[in-house]
Amino acid sequence: MNPKIRTEAVDHLFEAILTLKDKDECYNFFEDLCTVNELLSLSQRYEVASMLKEKKTYLEIAEKTGASTATISRVNRSLNYGCDGYELVFSRLDK
């Protein structure tokens, strides 16, 4: 885990997120918290990660998601050398 992001403020944010009970609550909270572009960027990265796990090519991913090759590469680096956060979620969702 990156110690630079482990702050009291980030802890408070994650505690707030963990109180959400369903998708509608998530929509309401994240719509208040994020701009539309921020939320779309987060969802795009998650979609990229999912497609990389399915062994899709960068070209296929870029065409489907609109993500740049730089974004795809960053997500790929997180999948290969990150904290396994994506893998944890994928395993719980049976992806």
Image (cartoon, grey):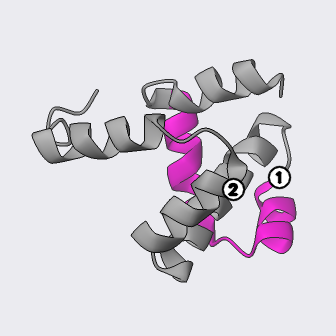
Which residue is located at x 62 percent, y 72 percent?
68
> Taking the image as drawn, is residue 27 in sight?
yes
- Residue denoted by label 2: 24
Estimate how packed mark 1 is, as few (under 14), some (14 to 19) or many (20 or more) residues with alpha carbons within 10 Å. few
Gap in Å between the C-alphas at discs 1 and 2? Answer: 33 Å
- Would you identify the image quadrant in which residue 82 lies? top left
User: Which amino acid does the dot numbered 1 rest on?
Assistant: Thr
Q: In front: 45, or 56?
A: 45
**Main SS category, magenta section:** helix
Which region of the structure is painted magenta? 57-80
35 to the left or right of 93: left
**Circle 2 SS class:** helix
In the image, residue 82 sits, relative to residue 51, either above or below, namely above
In the rendered image, is residue 72 in sight? Answer: no
Tell me which residue sits at (87%, 62%) in the image.
60
Q: Position of residue 51 (x, y in %)?
A: 80, 47
| Residue 35 to residue 15: above or below | below
Q: Nearer the viewer, residue 75 or 39?
A: 39
How many numbered circles are shown?
Answer: 2
Q: Residue 3's spot in the image, x, y percent?
A: 15, 32
Percent coordinates x, y for residue 28 in the rendering:
57, 64
Horizontal and vertical percent for residue 90?
72, 28
Q: Nearer the viewer, mark 1 or mark 2?
A: 2
Q: Which residue is mark 1?
A: 57
Seen in the image, is 43 located left or right of residue 65? Answer: left
**Of callouts 1 and 2, the N-terminal one:** 2
Residue at image coords 24%, 42%: 12
Residue at 18% from the left image edge and 35% from the top image edge: 6
Q: Amino acid at mark 2?
A: Asp
Residue 82 in the image: above or below residue 49: above
Which quadrant of the rendered structure holds the N terminus?
A: top left
